[in-house]
Image: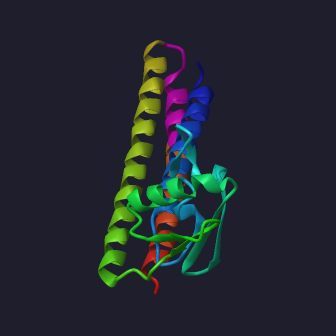
Amino acid sequence: MAIKEVLFNTEEKMKKSYESMNRQFHEVRTGRASPSLVEGLHIDYYGTPTMLKQLAAISAPDAHLIVIQPWDVSVIVEIEKTILKSNLGVNPSNDGKIIRIAVPQLSKERRQEMAKLVHKMSEDGRVSMRTIRRDAKEAMEKMEKDKIVSEDAKFRGVDELQKIVDKYIAKIDELLKSKEKEILEF
């Protein structure tokens, strides 16, 4: 296994870690209604946990309303139960065909709690990147020790690895900044 292969695999792992963190960020509630708040909820659909976005059309016609229109109206009660059980802090209402969720404005304290939460999530993302970097660096050091690559090749690989890590940490910081702005603006 060459240094390039280690770098390629490392970047793939970092990409997946970043995408996972990005999905978590989208699930954090801001003061604005967004379909991404509910589309990842798992609904018990005839005994099978199914994501809400696979069972219904989800839209946000304005900044304070989410509308869910299930393709199978028999699942509407199950969707409503799942939304109530989730920690979104919203009350769905249904008319038998569609579910409406009024998304209230967040209080200042709640906004600050959410900002702290996204800071913790971004720090977890950075820790994940550093863990992936450590594993890659150890793999390169093992290759050098086993005389598969030269010391110079290992150092070039470690430099390249650091550039990849810096790129993903910058992406995390950018994501944090935009999400924090979204949460704290009224």
- Residue 142 locus on image (x, y percent): 43, 19
Q: Is 85 on the left-hand or right-hand side of 64?
A: left
Q: 62 or 4, which lies in front?
A: 62
How far across and how far down the image is residue 108, in percent?
33, 83
Name the one closer to the observer, 57 or 105.
57
Magenta span: helix, strand or loop, mainly?
Answer: helix
| 84 magenta-colored | no
Residue drawn at x 46%, y 84% is: 185
Question: In the picture, residue 131 is in which quadrant?
Answer: top left
Residue located at (51% from left, 28% from top): 154
Question: Tag count in the figure?
Answer: 0
Quadrant of res 184 = bottom left
User: Is residue 170 visible to us here?
Assistant: no
The answer to whether one can see residue 111 in this image is yes
Q: Which residues are magenta?
A: 147-161
Query: In which quadrant of the rendered image does the N terminus lie?
Result: top right
Q: Nearer the viewer, residue 36 or 165?
A: 36
Asked if residue 169 lies left or right of residue 110, the reply is right
Q: Position of residue 157 (x, y in %)?
A: 54, 34
Q: Which residue lies at the image location 46% right of the left edge and 55% below the top edge?
A: 82
